[in-house]
Amino acid sequence: MTTPDSHQAASKRRSDQRHAVADLHPTVRAVSDRIRARSAARRSAYLRQVREAAARGEQGSARSGLGCANLAHGVAACGAEDRSRLLAVGTGAPPASPTNVAVVTSYNDMLSAHQPFADFPEMIKTAVRDAGGVAQVAGGVPAMCDGITQGRAGMELSLFSRDVIALSTAVALSHDMFDAALLLGVCDKIVPGLVMGGLAFGHLPTVLVPAGPMGSGLPNAEKSRIRRRHAAGEIGRDELLEAETRSYHSPGTCTFYGTANSNQLLMEVMGLHLPGASFVPPNTPLRDALTAAAAQQALVNAREGLGAMGDVVDERAVVNGVVALLATGGSTNHTLHLVAIAGAAGIDLTWDDFDKLSAVVPLLARIYPNGAADVNHFHAAGGTAVLIGSLLDAGLLHPDVTTVVGKGLDDYRRAPHLDRDGLKWRDGPAETADREVLRPVDDPFAPDGGLRMLHGNLGRAVVKVSAVDDAERVITAPARVFDDQADLRAAFEAGELTGDLVAVVRHQGPRANGMPELHALTPVLGVLRSRGQRVALVTDGRMSGASGAIPAAIHCTPEAAAGGSLARVRDGDPIRLDTRTGRLDVLADLDVRSPVGPPEGAVTGTGRELFSAFRAVVGPADRGAVVAAPAVAMTDPTAGAIGASVADGAR
């Protein structure tokens, strides 16, 4: 296997030889400059914390500051070789001193995406031991599945699980035993939570380790058709269940381009994965080799003082993440998660930044629900290597970033493969192999990123239009108002949803009930649309990466429970949703009305009562719906946005 340090040096030489740096697009530059300016105080405070933490480990390891009893606890379970290495502390600066790599894992064997992680710790320990270091499983984080909890009470814990994961990651890394970290995660809230927690230890070289997607199953268009037929009462549960189990059928990530696979692509573009690691299937020789290489890369970075997470996740990497999300029509959940991740690094990212970038970033990928293909088809068409190369050549990505494999995003034009000598990286394809799935910048599927920010007398909201027909980009129709998604389904089943309508589902924001995803409503709304009705959705809840052809103004803020205008909307009020001008308005006088409160009854059952404190302090959607706010945001008097939003949420 090519060692990560030799890969780093070789790929850097080739990058210098092969690619001239494209001029950065003026809008990308302007947005980046504005983010940098508004974040200056918070980012400086964050980096100061990072440098102070790094300084504590300059004498070989942070372990050198532990008392003898403390250290003995930390090595008690180790084998003789690992124990000997970990006890050799304070003996000089790296690389002479031993290196201990923390593994933080989201493994469980109920969820297909995380089941492959069962075997990763031993692979990692072996790879690190072979390179003269030690790896320890520092802790685990919860991993729940939005697919299982859709429409159920458990979905009201989903968004808050992100902050629980961030806190759990911090607990795992808090023992001052580690010189580097590997964060093992894939799905919706898990990866953002791991990154947020990891950034609290931004002095540690950190690599994100994915597990890969399951094989392609039932085609997505057929799955959607069967779901609509079931919603319309044309087929029974047995037929629906048979189709669903043909779709979700083996270990690995679900293959549609929802939040989980958006996570993987963003982590690669932001330089936190090894190049080409995102969509290699689990339980294959190449995936195993990439896992071992990630472990050794973290070890090398720790010994050479490279790849600290706080340096990798800077303003340029955050902008690159937004650009990649827009260029691929990724999950709308990342209008929350990228804001929260940026905040954890002391960076103030706003929805306006998404909006300005969306206007100039073309849509280059069609992956379900924005097309028929799944992520395996995207990977086969050239995947991340083609996408990143195209965006770099168009000046839409910052090339001069720090990544886990060195300096510069050019390394990510390359693709991993196995030969007789082990794992190697070679030039990835320069052009797409399937223009129905992945296209170049000069021939995109659409000239913009398909994400719109709306504003009006209903507040601010996000709408994803990359799969919406042009004829449905503007809808004016009477409101049908619901305070629970179950009530909407009941009205549908009773035949009450006739004519054109804008379904308003309110009291679904973070303060009300944890902001559950509502895409279990997608088949219902799809049936209405198929009957010729003009239909849209307005909600302070979420729809995630599974939102598709129905215009959906989501994440509406201020939410109804925080006094937002949605609480004053009534049945029959005309609502205008205009994605062309970016407006979201109710054509009624709301000032003369009193707000309607949330449904009566305490939020209890399925553990929801345990999260009452989270609901009391959570910030608004446009600030990332953050609970575990970074200390710099809460204490820096110039920090403003995120710290203030959390405080506002408590009032």
Image (cartoon, rainbow, N blue to C red):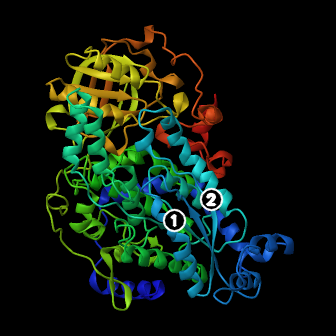
Q: Are marks 2 and 1 in contact (CB under 8 Å)?
A: no
Q: Amino acid at mark 2?
A: Ala
Quarter of the C terminus within the rendering: top right
Q: Which mark is residue 162?
A: none
For mark 1, give the secondary structure. helix
Q: Amino acid at mark 1?
A: Ala
In depth, the one of 61 and 203 nearer the eye is: 61
Give percent across and percent down for residue 625.
52, 40
* Residue at the image position 51 percent from the left and 63 percent from the top: 184
Q: Which residue is mark 2?
A: 200
Q: Quadrant of residue 607?
A: top right
Which of the two labelled residues, at mark 2 and mark 1, occupies the earlier sequence position? 1
Q: Which residue is mark 1?
A: 118
Residue density around tag 1, few if under 14, some if 14–19, many if 20 or more, within 10 Å = some
In depth, the one of 458 and 198 nearer the eye is: 198
Q: Is residue 582 left or right of residue 406?
A: left
